[in-house]
Amino acid sequence: MERFDVVLPCLDEAGALPAVLGALPPGFRPLVVDNGSTDGTPEIARRLGARVVSEPRRGYGAAVHTGIEQADTDIVCVIDADGSLDPAELPRLVEPVLAGRADLAVGRRVPTARGCWPWHARAGNALLAGLLRRRGLPVHDIGPVRAFRRADVLALGVTDRAFGYPLELLLRAAERSWRVVELDVGYGPRAKGTRSKVSGSVRGTLRAVNDMAAVLR
Ligand SMILES: Nc1nc2c(ncn2[C@@H]2O[C@H](COP(=O)(O)OP(=O)(O)O)[C@@H](O)[C@H]2O)c(=O)[nH]1
Ligand SMILES: [Mg+2]
């Protein structure tokens, strides 16, 4: 069976990891990238059988980039580890890449509950996705779940190491005329007892917007 490493950027996701790791389909191997969690995230991840690497530089992009570098499968997935997305949907994202129909498959979040996607995050996201469509990409979300060939994404040379990473990845994909496929994925509330680092607060959203604006300059 072909295997796929699944990069999980983690900052204090101990409460979410058991369910997230438990939902990975056969053949999808977790690679947890810890960023100085203080809630026991790396220990719990190891106990549940995940490979763990630690990335001392803070930031979503730093964690994701290190995870992709450390992965050792040809096709790699990236997904948030907060319980808001279902790892059972990863095979659907891998499929077009595996079949050679896409260079990058990204999830388009479809809320499954009220209130899990705050208006400020959604508005900023919709605006940026519109910008990407003008550059030729068929996307409606700057999604946090994706599948691609490891070597291809490393060759793209994404430089942002913070929350501009997902946008920069898509911009560079557009520049290279990559075949990007967007697929609906369910998006629910993060796991109970864990805290949002980005879009859960206006402050977090502003930080993400700031990081993304830097990418556009
Ligand atoms: N390694 C690492 N992961 C992060 C960092 N910030 C956020 N994350 C992870 O990135 C994912 C998305 O963050 P999250 O707080 O869910 O953002 P939100 O969905 O916008 O509230 C989660 O899996 C977080 O644990 C960071 O600085 N480093
Ligand atoms: Mg989240």
Image: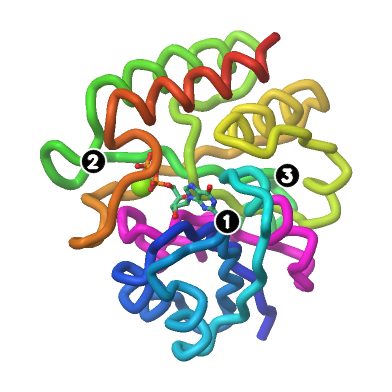
Label 1: which secondary element: strand
Look at label 3 and name its amino acid: Asp
What crowding class fits label 2: few (fewer than 14 Cα within 10 Å), some (14-19), or many (20 or more)?
A: some
The residue at 59%/44% (across/down) is: 59
As rendered, which of 13 and 22 lies closer to the eye? 13
Q: Pick the quarter of the image with the N terminus.
A: bottom right
Establish if 185 lies above or below 41.
above
Element on which disc 2 rests = strand
Q: Which residue is mark 3?
A: 103
* Mark 2 or mark 1: whose residue is earlier in sequence: 1
Amino acid beneath label 1: Val
Magenta residue span = 65-94
- Residue that label 2 marks: 111
In percent of width and height, residue 56 lies at: 67, 57
User: Of the numbered discs in the image, which one, if any, rests on residue 99?
Assistant: none
In this rendering, position of residue 197 left or right of residue 96: left
Residue depth check, mark 2 versus mark 1: number of the one nearer the observer: 1
Whole-percent x, y for residue 80 in the image: 45, 54
Residue 67 in magenta stretch = yes
Question: Which is nearer the N-term, disc 1 or disc 3?
Answer: 1
Q: Quick one: 60 or 1, which is closer to the camera?
A: 60
Query: Is the residue indicated by label 1 positioned so its CB lies within 8 Å of ligand 1?
Result: no
Residue wearing tag 1:
78
